[in-house]
Image: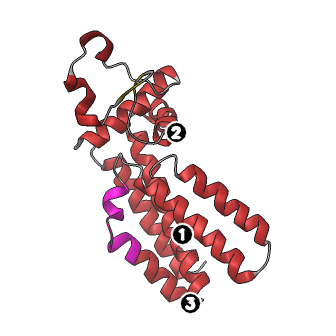
């Protein structure tokens, strides 16, 4: 096993530990909306939120536009991916399940970033440095243990880019790799646009 792999496994273990220790309190309205969407899907299998708007018709229940009222009722303003996958994780692991969605995506991003850099530069040290820069030099450490699904989208984009460039640069299995690239990027849009 290469030393870079061991470093990334160690960082991944720290991220999982951070996910178990991070606060599961809600800090901003976005997080409450994601949680409400996931809980609604968990309870009803749908996206229409029942927060009393039908009964009380208060503008306060729209939450400043975060829960717009549409033809079938209120729903979140966000794509449905977090509601769907988050609903299952919420049922299985409680509120922390939404955090683990990002932790797992962040771990995937570390390894995909390394693979992408290795593909482009053919140097293991550069590949490890790219992963370390990704985790330490960006907002990733914060997003890894948050309710926002940013890391799921980043994973989808990075993995899609890796597969596309691999097809483009190697010239092998071009159709299959390009197809996989699109099949990964498409569902990524269900989490964050």
* Among the two numbered marks 2 and 1 on one chain, the one whose residue lies closer to the N terminus: 2
Left or right: residue 120 versus residue 20 is right
Q: Is residue 139 magenta?
A: yes
Label 2 – label 1 distance at C-alpha: 22 Å
Q: Is residue 39 magenta?
A: no
Hey, which quadrant is residue 28 in on the image?
Answer: top left
Q: Nearer the viewer, residue 49 or 95?
A: 49
Dot 3 falls on a residue whose secondary structure is: loop
Q: What residue is rendered at 32% in x and 65% in y?
A: 139
- In x, y percent, where is residue 70? 40, 26
Residue 123's tag is 3
- The residue indicated by pointer 1 is 111
Label 3 – label 2 distance at C-alpha: 36 Å
Q: Nearer the viewer, residue 174 or 40?
A: 174
Q: What residue is rendered at 35% in x and 57% in y?
A: 143
Q: What residue is rendered at 48% in x and 81% in y?
A: 128
Residue 85's tag is 2
Q: Which residues are magenta?
A: 133-144
Above or below, 48 against 100 in this view is: above
């Amino acid at each position: 096993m290469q030393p870079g792999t061991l470093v990334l496994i160690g960082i991944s273990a720290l991220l999982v530990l951070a996910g178990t220790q991070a606060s599961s309190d809600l800090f901003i309205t976005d997080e409450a909306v994601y949680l409400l969407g996931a809980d609604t899907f968990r309870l009803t299998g749908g996206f229409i939120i029942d927060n009393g708007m039908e009964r009380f018709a208060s503008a306060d229940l729209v939450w400043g536009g975060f829960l717009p009222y549409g033809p079938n009722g209120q729903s979140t303003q966000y794509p449905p991916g977090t509601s769907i996958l988050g609903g299952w994780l919420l049922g299985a692991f409680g509120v922390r399940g939404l955090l683990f969605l990002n932790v797992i995506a962040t771990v995937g991003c570390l390894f995909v970033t390394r693979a992408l850099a290795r593909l482009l530069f053919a140097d293991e040290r550069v590949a490890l440095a790219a992963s370390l820069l990704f985790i330490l030099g960006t907002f990733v450490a914060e997003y890894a243990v948050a309710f926002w699904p940013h890391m799921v989208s980043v994973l989808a984009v990075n993995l899609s880019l890796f597969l596309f460039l691999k097809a483009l640069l190697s010239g092998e299995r071009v159709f299959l790799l390009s197809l996989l690239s699109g099949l990964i990027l498409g569902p990524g849009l269900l989490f964050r646009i």
